[in-house]
Image: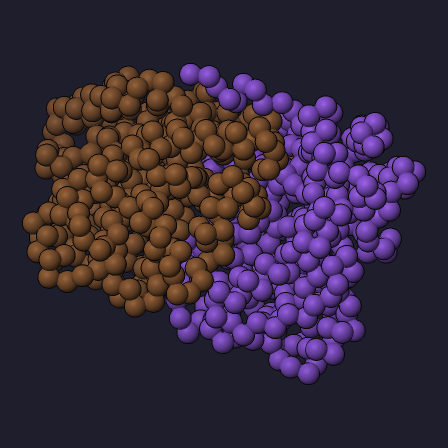
Chain colours: A brown, B purple
Amino acid sequence: MNNLLDGIEEILLMGPGPSCVSPEVYSALSCKTLGHLDPYFLKIADETKALLRRIMNTRNDFTIPISGTGSAGMEASFVNLVEPDDKVLILSNGVFGMRMQDVATRLRAKVEALEFPWGKPVIPEVVEKKVRSESYSLVAVVHAETSTGVRNPVAEIGTILKGSDALYLVDTVTSLGGIEVSMDDWNCDVLYSGTQKCLSCPPGLSPLSFSDRALAKVKARRTKVPNWYLDLTMIASYWDQNRIYHHTAPVNMIYALYQAVLLILEEGPERVFQRHLEAHLALVKGLEGLGLKMVVEEAFRLPMLNTVHVPEGVDEALVRKRLRNEFKIELGAGLGPFAGKAWRVGLMGHTARIENVSRFLAALKHVL
Amino acid sequence: MNNLLDGIEEILLMGPGPSCVSPEVYSALSCKTLGHLDPYFLKIADETKALLRRIMNTRNDFTIPISGTGSAGMEASFVNLVEPDDKVLILSNGVFGMRMQDVATRLRAKVEALEFPWGKPVIPEVVEKKVRSESYSLVAVVHAETSTGVRNPVAEIGTILKGSDALYLVDTVTSLGGIEVSMDDWNCDVLYSGTQKCLSCPPGLSPLSFSDRALAKVKARRTKVPNWYLDLTMIASYWDQNRIYHHTAPVNMIYALYQAVLLILEEGPERVFQRHLEAHLALVKGLEGLGLKMVVEEAFRLPMLNTVHVPEGVDEALVRKRLRNEFKIELGAGLGPFAGKAWRVGLMGHTARIENVSRFLAALKHVL
C-alpha cells in the first residue's frame, strides 16, 4: 500500500504550536519501548519529574506529565480541585481564559470571569479589588495567552493572592521553556504546560505540578473526582514509590519529554530565554520594516508568540497557504476577534533562532 | 549531563502491554512533526480514520483516535453517553469491568453490575434474562479481559441486544488486531481500544468508534458533556471537514498508529490472527510441558493474554525479576484475586511469534 508517511516534508513550524523538534528529541521518541512498570523506565520517569521541577522552579514532589495534551492538564487541574458550587475566579483575556470558564462551568462550579480586552494584559489592581471584595476557592490565569500574544503579570497576581485562601492556578502551556516560570516564587499552587510549545517536543503530554496545599484540597474532597482517567489521587500512586497501576503511561512520549527538558537545562534556561528574546526582537524589527504593525503593546509582548495585523487588502489565508506550499513555513491564523485580521508568528523552543526569523521574513516579503 | 535514554535495553515485552514495536512504527514515530492543521497532516489523519474503520470492521464515519491511552477511550465513551440517573448495565468479570463501574458511577449514572467469576466468561443466557427484565440506556462489556485472559462472547451479547433501546459498548483494548473485531456485525454502538496491545504501537492513543445511534444520543444530551477535553461533539468538528481547533492532536503518535494499522492490513488480518493463535498454542503446549496449569478453560482463552498458575512454592516476583534482568524478558504479574498466584503472558502484535515463545519457554525453564 502507498505509505503517506513517505511524503512528509520538513516544515518550519512558526505557528502557535507544535514547534520544530530537535534531532535528539526525535531520537528519544523512537528509543525501544519499555514496560510502564519496568524498573529502568521508572528511573526515567522519576528523573523526568526532577527535570520538570527544575524547569518550573518548584520543590513540589507532585510534578508529573499528564497523559494527554496541554488541555488535558487544564482539565485535570480543574476537575481535581473544583467541586460543585465552589467559587472560581478566572482572569480572562483570550481563548484560553474562555476555555477555563467552559471547563469549570461543566464541573458545576460558580464561575466568575474578570474580563480584560483581547490583546491587553490582566491588570493587577483590578484583580486586587476583586479578590478583596469576595472570596474564591480558586483563582486562575493564563501566563502566555497563545490567542493574542499577551504576557500576563502572574508574579504580581501571586503577590496579591499571598495569604488568601484561594488556590492560585497558572496556565504555562506556551510560556514554559521560553520565558521564566517560577512556580514557587509566584506563590502558585497549580501549574500545567504542554509539550509542543517551547519545550519543542511533539504534542501529547501535559507537564503538571500541584503544591501541597493543592493536594490537600484534592484529598479533602467531599466527592470522588468525577473523571477516572484524570483522578490525581490515583495517578499519584503510580508516580510515587507505590507504583500502583492506573493507566499505561505513554512511555515513548515520556522519553521525548525527558530529552526535551534535558536539552533546555544543558543549554541553560537563561541562554534559552535570551535566544527567544533575540529572535523575537529581530522578528519585530523585520515585520515593522515591512510596514506591518504588532497587535500587542511592547511591554506585554511574548517573545514566543507574536501577533501582527494583516495589512489592509491582503488575503491572509492565501499568504499562509503560499508560505506553506512555496516556502515550507507554517504561519498561524488569528483567533476570535483576530480571525482574518492578524497572524500569529510562533518562535517557540527549537524554532526560536535568528536564521529562522530571516528565512520567514524573506519569504513573507516575497509573498506580500 | 548523563543521559538515561542511552541505557535503554531492548526488552522482549511479554506482559499485558505495551507489546514489542516494529521497526517501521519506530520510524513513523520520528517522522517530522507537522502542524495539527497542516493539510498534509490532515490527509494522514483522514487515512488513519479509514484504516481504523477497516480493522474494526465498521462503516461508522466517527472513528478516530482519542488523545489519551485506552482508559481515556473508556472515559470518553461513558462521559459522552451517560447522563445523571441513566441506567447502565456493566457485564463484569475482571479489572476492566470494575473500572467501567467506577467510571460510570462517578458520572452519577445508576450503575448495575452483572458479575461473573474472574477467569470465567460472561454467560449470554444470564445477560438475556437480565436485559429482558429491565431496560438500560447502555450495556457494556470487555471483549478481552486483560486481567484474566478471558474472551467474552461479545457477538452473542450483541444478538441479544438487537432491537433493544440500550446502546451496546464493547471494550476492545486488548483484542483489536489480535482476534477478529466486527463492530457492525456485533450490533455494537461504541467501541474503543488502545495502541499498545495488539496494534503494537507505543501507548498514548485510544482508537474509538461511535455508531450514528450513539452520536444521536450524545447530540440529544440534556446537559453539556462534563468533560471539556473529551467532549466528542467538539472533537468531532476537528476530525470532520470543519477542522475546528479543539486541542492539538498528538501528531507523531498518530503517525505511529497509522503505520501500525497499515502493517496489520498489509500482512492481512486473517494471517495476523493466525500468527497470534499459533504462538498461543505453542505457548500453552510449552507451559503444560513444564507442568504448569492454565487459569482459563480452553474454550474461552485469549491468544494474546495467557494467565498461568504460579506453581506451589515458587516466588513469582523473583521469577519475573530474573526473567527481566538475566533474559531481558518482561512477564506480567497477576491482578486482583490472581495477584501473587498467576502470571500473565502477553503475545500481542509484533510480540506474537513462535521464536519469542521459544525464547520465553527456554528462559522460564531455566529460572524454574
Residue B356 can be seen in this image: yes
Up/down of A90 relative to B289, above or below: below
Tell me where residue B141 sits by quadrant.
bottom right
Tell me where residue B96 sits by quadrant.
bottom right
Q: Residue at position x 70%, y 49% from top?
A: B339
Residue found at the very far front of the displayed protein: B313
Where residue B77 appears, as percent x and y from the top left, is 54, 60
Which sits in the foreground, A269 or B353?
A269
Left or right, B184 with respect to A190, comes to: right
Point out the image quarter for the N terminus of chain A: top right
Where residue B38 appears, as percent x and y from the top left, is 41, 37
Left or right, A88 with respect to B359, comes to: left
Point out the image quarter for the C terminus of chain A: top left
Which sits in the foreground, B333 or A256?
B333
Where residue A15 appears, as percent x and y from the top left, is 31, 35
Q: Residue at position x 31%, y 35% from top?
A: A58
Where residue A188 appears, as percent x and y from the top left, is 25, 43
Tell me where residue B271 sits by quadrant.
top right
Which sits in the foreground, A130 or B315?
B315
Which sits in the foreground, A165 or A2?
A165
Up/down of A237 relative to B136, above or below: above
* Total number of numbered discs in the rendering: 0
Q: Residue at position x 14%, y 32% from top?
A: A292
Residue B274 can be seen in this image: no
Q: Residue at position x 30%, y 68% from top?
A: A85
